[in-house]
Amino acid sequence: MQTPNGILPVDKPAGWTSFDVLAKLRGALGTRKLGHSGTLDPMATGVLAVFIGKATAAADRQLNHDKTYEATIRLGLRTDTGDITGTALETAPVTVGESDLKAVLPQFTGELMQLPPMYSAVKINGQPLYKAARKGQTVERTPRPITVYSIEYLGSPAPGDYILRVSCSKGTYIRVLAEDIGTALGVPATLAALRRTQAGEFGIEQCHTLPEILAAAESGALESNGWMLPIETVFAPLPQLHVDNAVKKHLLNGCPTSHYPAEDGRYRVYGPDGAFLGLAAITGGVLNVEKLFCERD
């Protein structure tokens, strides 16, 4: 079976690590050349973009790293992990309600400083924090800048539980946001559920479940059913540049093209046949290749 090239947006199931998803897909797709962007905690569900074949080189070149989540905050409980999978550290009666929650939400939007949680993959002195946390250790951490673009209140599915839609920058920990909201309300809080509905250029409406993907792979329909998105999807914010055969040859050979009639900047480049070639940049009127994603002729 030929190795596929593209991006497969997966609706990650609860209870699976992001690595578990890759391990399962490696066997189904017949390739070890897989990667993903934007790790999700095991309890979380939703958008996990899996990069396959040549697309793996695009994972760390994404332009849009913003995320949107639907988070269920549970008031009256605080755990060691910041979510309900952890051990309870504190419980308290819930003395606040919907109106109180809505009143404090505005203070959690905009540019903020957030302390990474101990149960996270953030490395301090070369060691992931979660390894220290599992030993019962607490490591001194430095707050990091994040941006929360918006928080929308979606309702209360059960007493003490509240659902919020959060749009935020890369590196935002929703578990910490839940705890901080609880602190502002004067009650302990933890994350009861988390679903990512947008990750960069990928939305939940583009995702398919693992059983659906595995069945399609087994039937040989995965590459023909349109679920696998082209590599250039992650570069959608960049303007397109269509080049002729002479310029294409330059790009494939790594040669610059001088006096190129286009504005300086980064581009996603297409050949005369409309096929995506890769990324290039124009500086001072000179076109140079940045990264190719096509086969050399």
Image: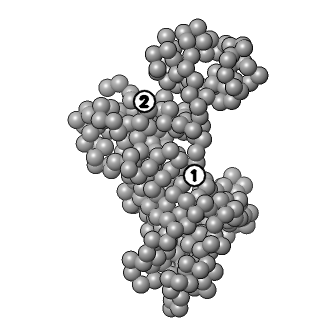
* Image: 121 above or below 182: above
Quarter of the image that includes the N terminus: top left
* Image: 244 above or below 164: above
Q: What element carries label 2?
A: loop
The outermost residue toward the top is: 246
Rendered location of residue 90, percent (x, y) = 55, 84
Q: What element carries label 1?
A: loop
Residue on which disc 1 sits: 66
The outermost residue toward the right is: 284
Residue 101's quadrant in the figure?
A: bottom right
Residue 5 image label: 2
In the image: residue 3, left or right of residue 240: left
* Image: 292 above or below 207: above
Which amino acid is tagged 1? Answer: Asp
Residue that appears at 45% across and 56% down: 197
Which amino acid is tagged 2? Answer: Asn
Rendered location of residue 254, percent (x, y) = 64, 15
Q: Which of 64 and 253 is in front in this view?
A: 64
